[in-house]
Amino acid sequence: MSYESEVLVVGAGPTGLVAAITLAQQGVNVIVVDAAISNNNGARAAVVHAHTLEILSSLGIADAVIERGIRCDKLRFSGDASRQLLEVDMSVLKKDTPYPFSVLISQAHVEEALQSVLESLKVEIHRGNGITGIKRLLDDKVEVMLSNNSTIATKYIIGADGAHSTIRHLVGIDFKDPETGLSYDDPNITNTFQIALADVYMAQVPSPIPLNEPTFQLDRNLMLIPLPSSEPNRLMWRVGLGSPPNADEIPHNPPIEYFQEEINKRNTFDMPFVISSILSSSRYRVRAALADTYNAKIGKTHVLLVGDAAHVHSPVGGQGMNMGICDAVSAARTIIHHMKSEDDADRDLVFQTYTKKTTRGRRTSSRNGDEHDQVVGFWRRRKLEEKFISIYECNSLEAPQHASVDILSRKVWKSVSGCMVE
């Protein structure tokens, strides 16, 4: 079967769905395809930050995400159960954003909200159809071949198909670590920081653990994030367990026994954690990679890369899905502007603007490439200590053991939340 669209979005994760919504709301004919039948990729993103909420608000989607999630007003980082290092109060952002908070929400629930919007816009999602090739046509379009032998003729392509992007590969864009120059898919990259992630139900959680904030224990490489579940009035927990380079290999899709044993080893509370069931799990290797360019041309057809297809980095700060959503809106608006441009000589300049906006991904990837050389947990403790020392002008952490200082909180959270982005 043959289809035709103005824009083809490849990838039906949050990034691809937001790109399609942005286009469809402006009357653009868009089709979405995804190689996977479903988006059940295991435990992944778990937070939507302030700047991303602003972007989603411009599309009329922010409220749907907020309603499905848990409002988080503070972050606390501790060495163990008894020693707090840093408290970040997000209310310090109230002058910078209408959303001085984050939303704790699983990627699956974000996708649920986005898909309901796409359905109302009558946008087709072709699932279980991977891209097998791209052929240049005689006019200003290309023909994209799908694994079910269907074809789609289109003028623009948005590659939102993740770190192992087929679109990026077919177009011939290199994807390398900015520090080492090694390809993202290089089999020799093995000695990396690993993270075991799982969504679980808990039969018992120590009472000091907050039910509306993440828990980060840096000395123990332990992260716990409360999330809404598919069951009413029942919390799901995102568990993250970090393992430094040269540690034992984390098993693929770690079982419940692995998480219970590891959390027992790392628990510094007086009460135990008891996992009752595991919903999904995954293993993540921390790597950084950047596409050589975020846009390319096949004849007159423009191809834009967004999200993990363009830049992959450390999960520190929960930036992946957030930057992907921001990329998606920027790419879609760039295409809309290009469509409406009447000056053929200069109309391609809008893609340079897109590249400038996505340099945030480049900076983050470069910053986080060696993030775990001295990491303790999901945040680099040494960097936190350096911030304390520089701000308080002391030689130890004794003075600011409990740091709830506006200037520090605002600096840290403006960066993490994306509110530093213009």
Image (tube, rainbow, N blue to C red):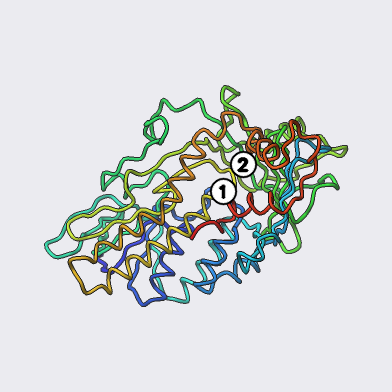
Q: Which residue is mark 1?
A: 44
**x and y percentages locating residue 158 in the rendered image:** 34, 58
Between the C-alphas of marks 2 and 1, the distance is: 8 Å
Q: Which mark is residue 130?
A: none
Q: Which residue is mark 2?
A: 197
Q: Residue furthest right?
A: 270
What's under tag 2, amino acid-wise? Leu
Describe residue 74's horizontal placement relative to residue 365 as left or right: right
Give the structural element (helix, strand or loop) at label 1.
loop
Question: Number of labelled discs?
Answer: 2
Choose top left, top right, bottom left or bottom right for residue 180.
top left
**x and y percentages locating residue 5 in the rendered image:** 28, 69
Q: Nearer the viewer, residue 163 or 148?
A: 163
Describe residue 194's horizontal placement relative to residue 237 as left or right: left
The relative height of residue 301 versus residue 249 in the rendered view (above or below) is below
Give the structural element (helix, strand or loop) at label 2.
strand
Describe residue 405's horizontal placement relative to residue 175 as left or right: right
* Labelled pair 2, 1 in contact (Cβ < 8 Å): yes
Q: Nearer the viewer, residue 175 or 149?
A: 175
